Image (spheres, rainbow, N blue to C red):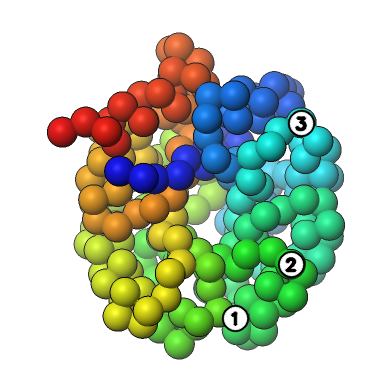
Amino acid sequence: MSVKLSPSLLSADFASLREAARACSEAGAEYLHFDVMDGQFVPNLTFGVQVVEALRPHTPAGFDVHLMMVQPERLIEPLAKAGADIITVQVEACTHSQRVLAQIRAAGVRAGLALNPATPLSSVEYLLDDIDLLLIMSVNPGFGGQSFIPSALRKIREAAQMLRAAGVAAEIEVDGGVGPANVRAVAAAGCTMVVAGSSVFGHPQGVAGGVRALREALSSG
């Protein structure tokens, strides 16, 4: 299965982010996932524009930036300048989602829209022409290391059907609790891009072992 990997730096050692970024790209991961949290939309507080900018010279991987914050439009231009390749906003955090997505594209960056586990797909039905990526959260956002919510598989399948029916070639990304045990099922449901945190950075054989385990799981069967 052709699925892109986007290891989540939320699960990396924050004291060694440059080494973590390099290890991911050397292991063959296509993207790096940055969870930008503001302590308001979600209870956690992580990193921001400066970290994206500081890591950009150290890896050829695409930068997949997920804004878990209120008023995400404030960081779109700075993140685009810092080197983001994809900027994803939460539909629940945007009063004017279409305007924000247009702002992301105008900054020369691919636009993504994320849905929390309880948010229905109908909330993005009229925004499909404005997105390059649809992110299905398979855990409640805010912290790494959570377990995959099983109902997300049905949501992924329905999202894939919705995009096909609309003729939209957006990526379907899945974030939360994905590892070797379930990544093949997630891909079979229609996911084309996987965010993996603890399964990559917590692997006993390091980042390379975590990426390899995911690739082997995807190619098995």
Q: Position of residue 123 (x, y in %)?
A: 42, 81
Lower sequence index among marks 3 and 2:
3
Residue at x-position 66% and y-position 84%: 99
Viewport quadrant of the C terminus:
top left
Which image quadrant is residue 146 in? top left
Residue type marked 3: His
Residue at x-position 39% and y-position 45%: 3
| Marking on residue 67 | none
Residue type marked 1: Ser
In the picture of the structure, the residue carrying the numbered disc 3 is 58
Q: Is residue 14 visible?
A: no
Taking depth in this image into account, of 12 and 7 the one nearest to the observer is 7
Lower sequence index among marks 1 and 3:
3
Instruction: Decide: is 80 above or below 161.
Output: above
Q: Could you tell me which secondary element the residue under label 2 belongs to?
A: loop
| Marking on residue 97 | 1
Q: Distance between the residues labelled 3 and 2?
A: 21 Å
Residue type marked 2: Gly
In the picture of the structure, the residue carrying the numbered disc 2 is 108
